Amino acid sequence: AGGESCQDVADRALAGLRDALAGDSRHVLAVAHSRVNKSLIAALRGDLRRCSDVQQGNACVNVLDVDEEGEAAVVLLDYRGHTDGAAWS
């Protein structure tokens, strides 16, 4: 077993997001594994206990609006319309 907890992953992901937003950039594209996405989204929603409940499919798109205080609104979650008919191997 072992590995990072949801809190550990969220801490790492939030630090990376803060770094990405530290400059003048207001738009960030982050590509990550589902565990990172789930942890980051749960942390931004304020409830890491729900980390496993966040749905994340292969190649899904999430859009989050993070304000200057770090509050996040989920605009789009687990969107997979661009993969319709795609063959995954």
Image (tube, rainbow, N blue to C red):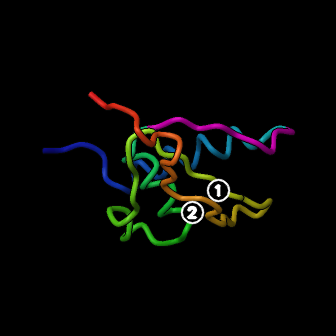
Main secondary structure along the magenta-highlighted residues: loop
Residue 87 lies left or right of residue 63; in this view the side is left
| Residue 47 placement (x, y as % from top left) | 46, 72
User: Which residue corresponds to the image point at 45% horizontal and 43% vertical from the top-left?
Assistant: 84
Q: Residue furthest right?
A: 24
Q: Which residue is under mark 2? A: 44
Span of residues in magenta:
24-32
Query: In the rendered view, would you say 47 is above or below 44?
Result: below
From this view, report whether residue 53 is shown above or below residue 63. Answer: below
**Image quarter of residue 55:** bottom left
Which corner quadrant holds the N terminus? top left
Report how far apart the C-alphas of labels 1 and 2 lie in the structure.
Answer: 9 Å
* Residue at (70% x, 38% y) in the render: 20
Residue tagged by mark 1? 64
Q: Pointer 2: residues within 10 angstroms few (<14), some, or many (20+)?
A: some
**Image spot of residue 6 (x, y percent):** 36, 55
Instruction: Please name whichever residue, 44 or 81, is drawn nearer the observer in this view of the structure.
Output: 81
Kindly state the secondary structure of the residue where label 1 is placed. Answer: strand
> Could you tell me if the residues under marks 1 and 2 are in contact, i.e. CB atoms within 8 Å?
yes
Q: Image quarter for residue 71?
A: bottom right
**Residue type of the residue flagged with mark 1:** Leu
Answer left or right for 11 relative to 30: left
Residue at (56% x, 51% y) in the render: 62
Please check the rendered image and state whether residue 7 is part of the magenta-colored stretch, yes or no.
no
Q: Position of residue 13 (x, y in %)?
A: 52, 45
Residue 66 position, x and y percent, is 71, 58
Residue at image coords 35%, 66%: 53
